[in-house]
């Protein structure tokens, strides 16, 4: 597939953006437009020497890979699109979502977590193959890899292997959150996650590897990946207000991990009250994908990060 070179809006590095609208698009079988099975004489032609973009995803077509149990991330990303559905912002931005099959989402023990890790990493090949069928221009990893992998080196090594299977550029959580925290010059952070003790230890390790001081962490110890989506917003707010963003902790930012734990509405309510950013994984990773791929408009409904950077 032909491509054009784009300079990343965040990384400043050049990468290939596939030309998914290269001529002829759409290609038509002979005899072209038909009526009652016969060539529609006088209708005119959809010219093969011109390029007609995807009617819904004409500005950017993103491929999103998420665990099959995830009911939150796609919803949050579409809510950002539709809250900013204007010609000067996200009209023409589309998402093509592919599930990574994870048939045993139990997370009650360390053995369960290892099995979930095996399922997800082994299922990535098939999911990526499916995602590429829609010819996305940019890919988004919709998974908190720090939940199942220990340390930034292991995370980057796993992603490097995945990225080697395609020439398409990726947005990942570890790159996105580091870029977002740098925007706010944040160093002291508090983590809120759906993870248990081991998951929170892994998350803390990743952020410390990235150079951040994890002052405090709260995990909801969800015993099933599907159930993460059912943690109520009031509990997230209570955890942030009473356990993380306290005067004693003196945080520069609150960071949320776990793509199936929706927090976008909580962010909108709490950021004005706290005076520090609350950075949720789904919104931050999508922000990175948008900015890196050249979409720079200030956006509403997803926190300070979208409005200010």
Image (spheres, rainbow, N blue to C red):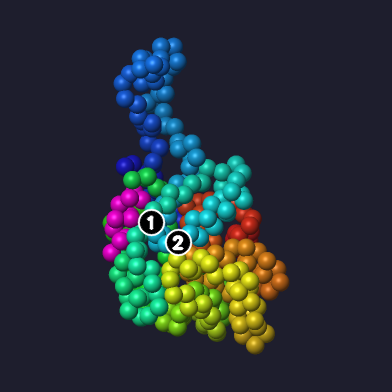
**Front one among 269 and 153:** 269
Q: Residue 143 in the image: state x and y as whole percent.
A: 42, 65
Q: Is residue 178 left or right of residue 254?
A: left
- The part of the chain drawn in magenta is 122-132
In the image, residue 58 lies at what x, y percent?
48, 40
- In the image, residue 128 sits, relative to residue 40, either above or below, namely below
The residue at the far top in this view is: 41
Element on which disc 2 rests: loop
Residue drawn at 44 percent across, 16 percent down? 44
Q: Is residue 242 visible?
A: yes
Q: Quadrant of residue 101?
A: bottom left
* Tag 1 near tag 2, CB within 8 Å: yes
The overriding secondary structure of the stretch rendered in magenta is helix
Q: Quadrant of residue 113?
A: bottom left
At label 2, counting other C-alpha atoms closer than 10 Å, the crowd grade (few under 14, some 14-19, many 20 or more) is many
* Residue indicated by mark 1: 99
Q: x and y percent of residue 154 in the render?
A: 33, 74
Distance between mark 1 and mark 2 Cα atoms: 8 Å
Q: Nearer the viewer, residue 126 or 235?
A: 235
Q: Residues within 10 Å of mark 1 (few under 14, many from 20)?
A: many
Query: Furthest-bottom residue in view?
Result: 248
Residue 170 visible in this rendered orientation of the protein: no
Residue at 35%, 29% in the rendered image = 27
User: Residue 297, relative to residue 69: is it above or below?
Assistant: above
Judged left or right of residue 227, residue 87 is: right
Label 2: which residue?
A: 70
């Amino acid at each position: 597939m032909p491509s054009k070179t784009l300079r990343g809006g965040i990384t400043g590095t050049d990468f290939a953006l596939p030309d998914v609208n290269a001529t002829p698009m759409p290609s038509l079988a002979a005899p072209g437009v038909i009526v009652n099975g016969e060539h529609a004489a006088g209708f005119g032609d959809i010219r093969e020497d011109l390029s007609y973009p995807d009617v819904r995803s004409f500005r950017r077509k993103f491929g999103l890979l998420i665990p099959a149990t995830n009911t939150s991330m796609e919803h949050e990303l579409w809510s950002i699109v539709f809250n900013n559905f204007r010609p000067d912002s996200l009209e023409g931005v589309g998402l093509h979502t592919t599930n990574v099959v994870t048939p045993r989402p139990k997370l009650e023990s360390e053995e369960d977590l290892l099995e979930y890790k095996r399922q997800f990493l082994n299922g990535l090949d098939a999911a990526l193959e499916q995602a590429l069928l829609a010819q996305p221009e940019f890919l988004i990893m919709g998974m908190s890899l720090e939940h199942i992998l220990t340390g930034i080196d292991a995370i980057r090594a796993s992603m490097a292997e995945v990225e080697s299977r395609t020439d398409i550029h990726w947005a990942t959580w570890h790159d996105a959150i580091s870029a977002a925290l740098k925007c706010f010059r944040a160093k002291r952070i508090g983590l809120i996650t759906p993870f248990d003790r081991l998951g929170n230890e892994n998350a803390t390790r990743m952020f410390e590897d990235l150079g951040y001081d994890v002052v405090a962490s709260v995990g909801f110890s969800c015993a099933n990946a599907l159930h993460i989506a059912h943690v109520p917003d009031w509990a997230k707010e209570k955890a942030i207000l009473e356990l993380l963003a306290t005067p004693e902790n003196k945080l520069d930012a609150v960071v949320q991990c776990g793509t199936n734990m929706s927090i976008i509405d909580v962010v909108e309510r709490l950021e004005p009250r706290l005076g520090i950013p609350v950075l949720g994984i789904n919104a931050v990773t999508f922000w990175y994908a948008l900015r890196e791929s050249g979409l720079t408009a200030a956006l509403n409904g997803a926190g300070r990060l979208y409005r200010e950077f």
